[in-house]
Image (spheres, rainbow, N blue to C red):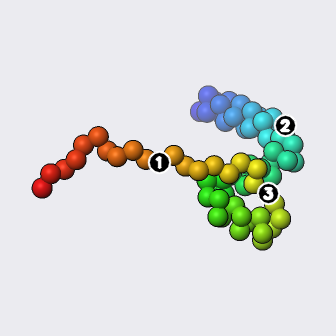
Amino acid sequence: MTLLIVLTTITLVCAALSLGNLSSQDAEQASLLPFADDPEAARQMTTETGLVCETVVRPAEEPDPPYTWKA
């Protein structure tokens, strides 16, 4: 039980230190990541809120499976 408390405390301290070092710009861009893979959603979000998602990416095409089922 003591080990669990120590590990939880370490995790919370590390998370607080990590989040404390984010600039407001970094935090804003992190909140916009759900829109980064959908250019249309990113444009709509920018139109509605005025926040610009700096990284808009196109997801990679998924390759065809290496097998095919024959009926």
Whichever of labels 2 and 3 marks the residue nearer the N terminus, that label is 2
Does residue 9 appear anywhere in the picture?
A: no
Badge 1 amino acid: Glu
Q: Nearer the viewer, mark 1 or mark 2?
A: 1
Q: Residue beneath label 1, please?
A: 61
Q: Position of residue 33 (x, y in %)?
A: 68, 52
Alpha carbons under labels 1 and 2: distance apart? 35 Å
Q: Residue beneath label 3, please?
A: 52
Q: Looking at the figure, which quarter contains the C terminus?
A: bottom left
Residue under the point 55% across and 49% down: 59
Secondary element at tag 1: loop
Camera-side residue of 69 and 24:
69
Whichever of labels 1 and 2 marks the residue nearer the N terminus, that label is 2
Label 1 Cα crowd, 10 Å radius (few <14 / some 14-19 / many 20+): few
Q: Residue beneath label 2, please?
A: 21
Report the residue that reaches farthest toward the right. 24
Report the residue that reaches farthest toward the left. 71
Count the numbered circles shown.
3
Q: Position of residue 23 (x, y in %)?
A: 87, 43
Label 3 Cα crowd, 10 Å radius (few <14 / some 14-19 / many 20+): some
Badge 1 vs badge 2, beta-carbon distance below 8 Å: no
Whichever of labels 1 and 3 marks the residue nearer the N terminus, that label is 3
Q: Nearer the viewer, mark 2 or mark 3?
A: 3
Camera-side residue of 21 and 34:
34
Q: Position of residue 36 (x, y in %)?
A: 66, 53
Residue 45 vertical position relative to residue 60 in the rendered view, above or below: below
